[in-house]
Image (cartoon, rainbow, N blue to C red):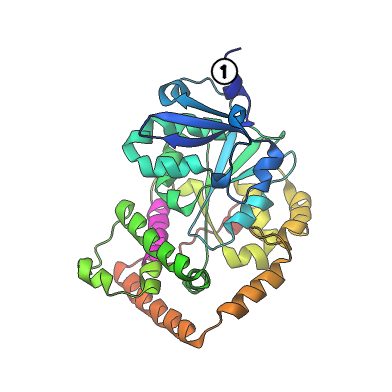
Amino acid sequence: MDDLTRIAGDPEWFVHRFDWRQKRVQFIRLSPEQMRAETFLADAKPRNDAESLWVPAEAVSGMSVPPGSIHFVFHTAFCRSTLLARALDIPELSFGLSEPAILNDLAVAGRDGASLLKPVLSLLARPVAGAPVMVVKPSNFANNLLGPILQEREDAKAILLSGSLAEFLRSVHRKGLMGRRWGRKLYGQVSRYAPLDLGLGESGLFELTDLQVAALGWFLQQRHFALALASPFGPRLATLDSDALVSDRLVSLEGVDRFFALGGGSGRMQQVADGAVFTSHAKLGGDYASIVSDQQRLAESEVVEEEIRIVGEWVGAIVAQTGLALPVSRPVTALQ
């Protein structure tokens, strides 16, 4: 058995990175336990040189990969997407993959990576730990792949997960300088694949506050989702509110179970809803309620709350001019 055949048939050879300049793909060895341990798979690293292998992109395109089932969770960031990915790691039903780096690489590569998308999706769909369905949560910086992914995988469906603009902006604020830089980076990226002329110009954009720019990034993501729902892919998409995922977790999980046809039923979803995944912080570990309370207390500011309120009204006026109904809504909980 040659290396390519061995890698294609073994999901623990995880498809990790795409180097579009040298047209090669990196595979690294990851056990199911290692996959679960990484908050974001983009941060995974091989333990030694023997557990990393670079393969020419052309060879990856020609791989014969065992069939697998795959669905997706796209999101607007800061909306409990990591929690949902962890909740969908259900023995014998589904396995969650949180933010594989290669999807970010393909999102940035554009046409240079287009021919690799289908084989990469096949590699991500390989069953892990006996779970027949893989659920992939890409980074929101890969949201431009939503349409291309559904085009390549006619069997795939996707949840569109989002939260309120106010909570999004509070999260940006809590991350300090890096959060505000991240918000500007987000707007820059989304405005390239989902542009909307806001009449600002370069100087007008420069005059906006950090939270205004981050809010525009949130809005353009929501608009991107709304356009996807109105496209031919619409029937394969469903929405989920991040607050409902926590406050009405069983109903939310039952909706996802039906939509993805996981076959868990109310009993299994109740076990997940009552389990530790909803009481521990998905990214930091520890008690979820205590960590969130501490974060909120440390970031409390009447000045920032006033800015968030004003920015919300400003974005609301922009949304009204577009005629869109936001947030997007095709609730997974209402689908049968």
Circle 1 sits in a helix, a strand or a loop, which is it?
Answer: helix
Q: Nearer the viewer, residue 318 or 60?
A: 60
Q: Is residue 250 left or right of residue 62?
A: right
From the viewer's perspective, is residue 66 above or below residue 308? above
Q: Which residue is mark 1?
A: 3
State the quadrant of the N terminus: top right
State the predominant SS element of the stretch in magenta: helix
Which stretch is magenta?
A: 216-230
The kind of residue on which mark 1 rests is: Asp
Q: Is residue 228 within the magenta segment?
A: yes
Q: Nearer the viewer, residue 241 or 232?
A: 241
Look at 35% across and 78% down and name the residue there.
Answer: 314
Look at 32% across and 72% down and name the residue there.
Answer: 318
Dot 1, crowdedness within 10 Å: few (<14), some or many (≥20)?
few
Query: Where's residue 138, x and y in %?
Result: 51, 48
Query: Where's residue 12, x and y in %?
Result: 64, 31
Q: Residue furthest bottom?
A: 302
Tell me which corner region of the image, top left, top right, bottom left or bottom right, holds residue 58.
top left
Look at 66% across and 51% down and name the residue there.
Answer: 86
Tell me which corner region of the image, top left, top right, bottom left or bottom right, holds residue 106.
top left
Tell me which corner region of the image, top left, top right, bottom left or bottom right, holds residue 273.
bottom right
Judge whether residue 55 can be spotted in this image. yes
Look at 30% across and 67% down and name the residue there.
Answer: 322
Q: Residue furthest top?
A: 1
Judge whether residue 262 can be spotted in this image. no
Query: Where's residue 171, x and y in %?
Result: 52, 69
Query: Where's residue 67, x and y in %?
Result: 58, 26
Q: Is residue 19 within the magenta segment?
A: no
